[in-house]
Amino acid sequence: PGRESVFRNVHCLRNNENAVLYGSRVNALVLDPPGAAAGGRVRHCWSCGGDGVVQKWDMEREETVLSIRGVHQINQSESNFKQVNNMGVECADACGPSCLVTGGCDKGISMWDSRASDRRANGPHMEVWHRSAAHYDEVLSVACSKTLPLVVSGGADDCVRVWDTRWMDQPLLELDTLHGGSVFAIAIDDAAKRCYTGSSDKTLSVWDLESGHWLSQAHGHAGDIYDIVLGTERILTASDDGTVREWALDGNREWFQELVCSQVLGADAQMDSMSEDSCKLDFKRVPTDVAGFRGVTPLSCLSLLGAEEKHFLAGTWSGDVVMGHLDPDGRDTQTFSKAIMKNVDLEEKDDGYYRSHSPVTAIAATTECVITGFNYGAVRFSRMMKAESEMD
């Protein structure tokens, strides 16, 4: 990055005097698809937090232009519920320009349209629809089709459901999930009309969106799968086992396709001492049959970088963002952005005891800017620096 800007306490819980009590985890960062007037350039993004707040950002000015509060939280005036940290929005995805679908701790799914906003109110009027009790437990992942009016959701109830946005009374399909754990990640392949799901049971599954039939399940990760990214020719997963795996579909039969792991990258972190170099990461290509790693830092989120899809960015639990090279002959993976301190007052302290890094929990990237969200509620904008060849 050529320049970085950090905004702290974007998502947090405050007391009656507006003082910050706790930072709330940034659970999702979503790029707002550009409309026809934008000329294909992404100008806005959404940040969604455990504090039940959805913020819309102007990426060029690096400031919020819209806030929606009380999202996926129980109304305290109508119950004895006491607000708890990180009990709000768990996941989100864009379903069109200025439109966002969210899922949360209230087990519901909502669609928001910021074009419906006005200056007289702040939030509820922008909710196009809400489906309560969409799952039996928290909604942990959602994905929107870019070509069909479909939303796929996954929950802590181990279920995957397909919804038609024109009729949300009942799910269009309830996939006969083979997952034995919470569904943390979902990605939709619109061209093939399939969806991919990743779970805490360490498996990646593929489903047919038209029939709801299960097509394949892949075993390979030694930890929870937290993110799935689909490129034009790539399928990537990130796990808390410290690896990014690239998968390929091998069509053995017309109705069944096997997911084959074609490449594994593992991140080793030296965490013996809390010093400046304590979170330096080293990505190494490892055999695909490795069942686990020692001394690894868990990976929490993932994003492809660049139109050619030769690089990826991964957020780590140690607080770094690392850039990986998918070209087998490429350079070793290096740190893209270093960790930041939980407390800005401790940035200049030399005593290693005070150096506490915040995990990266969400990431989104364009060719010009990388946005990262952190476990204690901060959002960072990293401006990409042009290569010397481009400046010439």
Image: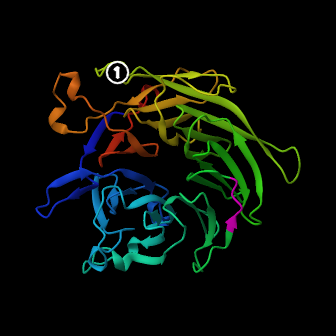
Locate residue 164 relative to residue 270 in the image: left or right: right
Locate residue 254 relative to residue 185 in the image: left or right: right
Give me the residue at 59% from left, 51% from top: 181
Give me the residue at 73% from left, 46% from top: 217
| Residue 225 higher or lower than 194, as above or below | above
Instruction: Name the one closer to the observer, 389 or 105.
Output: 105
Q: Residue furthest right?
A: 253
Instruction: Pinpoint residue 114: horizontal percent, then vertical percent.
Output: 39, 71
Give me the residue at 41% from left, 19% from top: 270
Would you say residue 96 is visible in this rendering?
A: yes
Task: Check disc 1 and report the residue beneath it.
Answer: 278
Instruction: Pinpoint residue 390: horizontal percent, then vertical percent.
Output: 45, 31
Give me the residue at 24% from left, 57% from top: 13
Locate residue 190 relative to residue 334 in the image: left or right: right
Quarter of the figure with residue 287: top right
Magenta stretch bounds: 174-178
Which quadrant holds the N terminus? Answer: top left
